[in-house]
Amino acid sequence: GQSLEQPSEVTAVEGAIVQINCTYQTSGFYGLSWYQQHDGGAPTFLSYNALDGLEETGRFSSFLSRSDSYGYLLLQELQMKDSASYFCAVTQGGFQKLVFGTGTRLLVSP
Amino acid sequence: SQTIHQWPATLVQPVGSPLSLECTVEGTSNPNLYWYRQAAGRGLQLLFYSVGIGQISSEVPQNLSASRPQDRQFILSSKKLLLSDSGFYLCAWSVPVSTGELFFGEGSRLTVL
């Protein structure tokens, strides 16, 4: 089987840095993705790590350690609009089957 | 550019009634197609995925079925809805290689009463 674990909720203030962790247990691991979902909306893709290391995209960075079955999403210079749920997802198999974690709700306050 | 549409956006159905949700993708060919369900405040549960016409993989035994009658059309169905079928249903597409990126439709919110 497979499982992904994330904290259920994280709070931070504007301008701060927050890290959302994800640990996973799965077979056939190809990579780890991160998605953002605002209330009532559809998830949108943020980043993908297939290899160990850090990937940076603007204010967002994502890290993967395959040996530790662990990754994280780092959000810098937080803005109010970053308040949303964030999901990690594991790609299983070469044909892009994604299994999602339970999500982390990020609340950014002024 | 590629677009994905799913409908209806919202529906309220009585227990025991049938269901049909439809999803179409434009601007690409031979996409992978997916149906996910999200319960309120919860994660995304993969229901079905398809790598080609008529090829459906089911992830969770349930009251639902899926079909792919055309390359860019994906349909989610039920003959008799249960209360537990309520949720936010999301269709998605991807290219058929590992990029980790899914493109989601706007979602269909189903309430079964």
Image (cartoon, coloured by chain):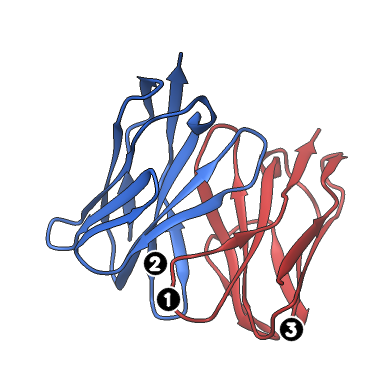
Disc 2 to disc 1: CB gap under 8 Å: yes
**The N terminus of chain A lies in which quarter of the figure?**
bottom left
- Numbered disc total: 3
Please say whether residue B76 is visible from this viewpoint: no
User: Label 2 belongs to which residue?
Assistant: A91
The residue positioned 45% from the left and 41% from the top of the image is A86
Q: Residues within 10 Å of mark 2 (few under 14, many from 20)?
A: many
The amino acid type found where label 1 is placed reads Ser
Q: Are marks 2 and 1 on the same chain?
A: no
Q: Give coordinates of residue B45: x percent, y percent.
A: 53, 52
Q: Secondary structure at mark 1?
A: loop
Report whether A71 appears left or right of B100: left
Q: Residue B7: x, y in percent?
A: 83, 55
Judged from the image, the secondary structure of the residue bearing numbered disc 3 is loop
What residue is shown with label 1? B98
Quarter of the rendering containing residue A93: bottom left
Q: At 37% from the left edge and 24% from the top edge, which residue is drawn? A: A15
Residue B76, position in %: x, y?
A: 75, 63
